[in-house]
Image (tube, grey):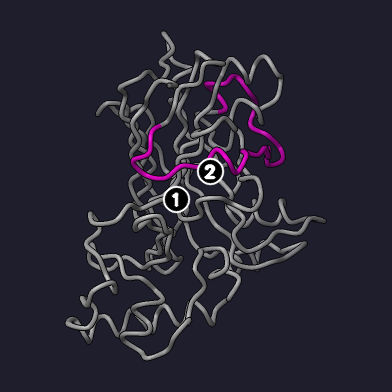
Amino acid sequence: MRLASYRVGNAIRLGSVVNDRVFDLNRAYTALLGERRAFPSDMVSLLEGGEEALRKVRDLHDAIASNDRASRAKGVSYAIDEVKIVAPIPRPRKNIVCLGVNYPEHAAERKREPPKYPVFFTKAPTSVIGPGEPIVLPRCSQLIDYEVELAFILGRRGRDIAEADAWDYIAGYTVLNDVTARDLQRAHQQWFKGKSLDTFAPMGPFLVTPEEVLDPHDLTIRLSLNGKTMQEDSTRELLFSIPEIVASLSACMTVEAGDIVATGTPGGVGDSRAPPVYLKAGDIVRAEVEGVGVLENPVTSSP
């Protein structure tokens, strides 16, 4: 399933994308299955509903397939270009967890040895934007870089999760662009500030549930800038697998439904090129993970 957060008017609602139509979960469930208030209004609350909530979404998919007329009733579904798709979790409750140097090629271009343990850092929740929204070049930085990443979203609360159990905690996957102010990263000698500026976490377009992604460790990951491929690799090259990441992150620390974890970027970042390539106003950045989605954002100057 492809689950989406979308905007109609001033409201952000929860939907499911089927054949390029967005089905409002609450309205569709009432129209097709006769039950009111079947779903919460936001993605995190849906995930906290656990398998029972996701089972209701699957029931809804079956109803959509068998009742095309009702599924197109007013307010039940929209053509995807009639609504504004936003980030799957527009405002995370916690910082986004990211991994540094988790691809061999990226470690090499940053002149770092492959790490012995996952390198965790975070991005602020206020950095999140959705597909089509502009990456805004800030006044406080001149060296803005791109980083395409596969991200996974946790669907359960847990602590000390064993690698063998990690898949049970994965609610789905999305695409994330870990936009970075390289000069701030170097000036502050840590990563949080340079990666947390407003608009620096484009994410989306959907939360894609695990049954749609047969092997998250065998996906092509790619980023293009103005149509030119800048990064391309496979998630086969991840230094730390998703189960290893979950186990390490949750060791002695509680993770929760709705937590977002970006798994690292491959080689080809702009800062490591000769000469370096940094984002400028008018650029179009297209981040893509096979089977998960395409995330495209324009770049604009700060007003």
Pointer 1 or 2: first along the chain: 1
Return the mark for residue 27.
none
- Calculate the distance from the C-alpha at mark 1 to the C-alpha at mark 2: 24 Å
Q: Is residue 109 magenta?
A: yes
Which element carries disc 1, helix, strand or loop? loop
Which element carries disc 2, helix, strand or loop? loop
The picture places residue 151, in percent across and down from the top left corner, at 51, 49
Pointer 2 residue: 238
Q: Which residues are magenta?
A: 107-134
Left or right of 125 on screen, residue 202: left
* Identity of the residue furthest to the right in this view: 252
Q: Is residue 162 positioned above or below 34 on the image?
A: above
The picture places residue 28, in percent across and down from the top left corner, at 33, 78
The picture places residue 275, in percent across and down from the top left corner, at 41, 8
Q: What type is the residue that disc 1 sits on?
A: Ala
Pointer 1 residue: 87
Where, by quadrant of the figure, is residue 120 drawn? top right
